[in-house]
Image: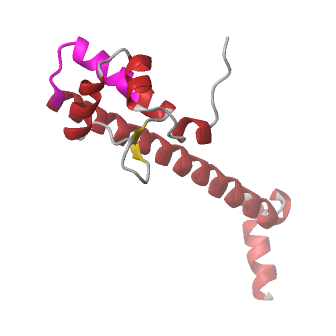
Amino acid sequence: MTEPLDRSAQVRAVYVISIAAELSGMHPQTLRIYERKGLLEPARTQGGSRRYSEADITMLRRIQELTEEGLNLAGVKRVLALEARLSALETELHQVRTEAARAVDETHRSYRRDLVPVQQAVARYNEAAHVLRRLSGQ
């Protein structure tokens, strides 16, 4: 079993187009078409050669899955955009939930400091008149 790559290794663009095509099981011209259609944007060297990362290879495989399911490239582009949006929203939701939990915890801690024992805070009904007279000075 291989270990998952860290994020920096996933985005490091190291593969030339022929290797990327072989790793993804596609023809190099297909990779060029996908780039032209805006489905993928490989890095470029100073000389203009394409370089693909592990993340690009993963994206190529996802594109292949979607096209094998019958989607055209416009549909694939839309699905990929929706998946990216969903991922971003899930990340945001996780952050918001974490912040909300932190705020609730902080609020609960502040309540605990302000608590007054029940015997000091509440007068029984039959003692209410006595307490009111004492407070008013009668």
Indicate yes or no whether the magenta region holds residue 88: no
Indicate yes or no whether the magenta region holds residue 62: yes
In the current view of this chain or complex, which residue is farthest to the bottom? 137
Task: Please tell me which residue is depicted at 60% across the width and 42% down the height of the picture.
Answer: 8
Q: Position of residue 104 (x, y in %)?
A: 64, 54
Q: Which residues are magenta?
A: 59-73
In this view, the residue in front, 72 or 36, is 36
In the displayed structure, 102 sits above or below 71; it is below
- Residue 122 visible somewhere in the drawing: no
Please indicate whether residue 136 sits to the left or right of residue 30 in the image: right
Quarter of the figure with the N terminus:
top right
- Residue 1 visible somewhere in the drawing: yes
Quarter of the figure with the C terminus:
bottom right
Task: Please tell me which residue is depicted at 20% across the width and 39% down the height of the picture.
Answer: 36
Q: Position of residue 32 (x, y in %)?
A: 25, 33
Task: Please tell me which residue is depicted at 38% across the width and 43% down the height of the picture.
Answer: 49
Task: Please tell me which residue is depicted at 42% across the width and 26% down the height of the picture.
Answer: 20
In this view, the residue in front, 120 or 41, is 41
Q: Quadrant of residue 89?
A: top left
In this view, the residue in front, 14 or 137, is 14
Q: Main secondary structure of the magenta part?
A: helix
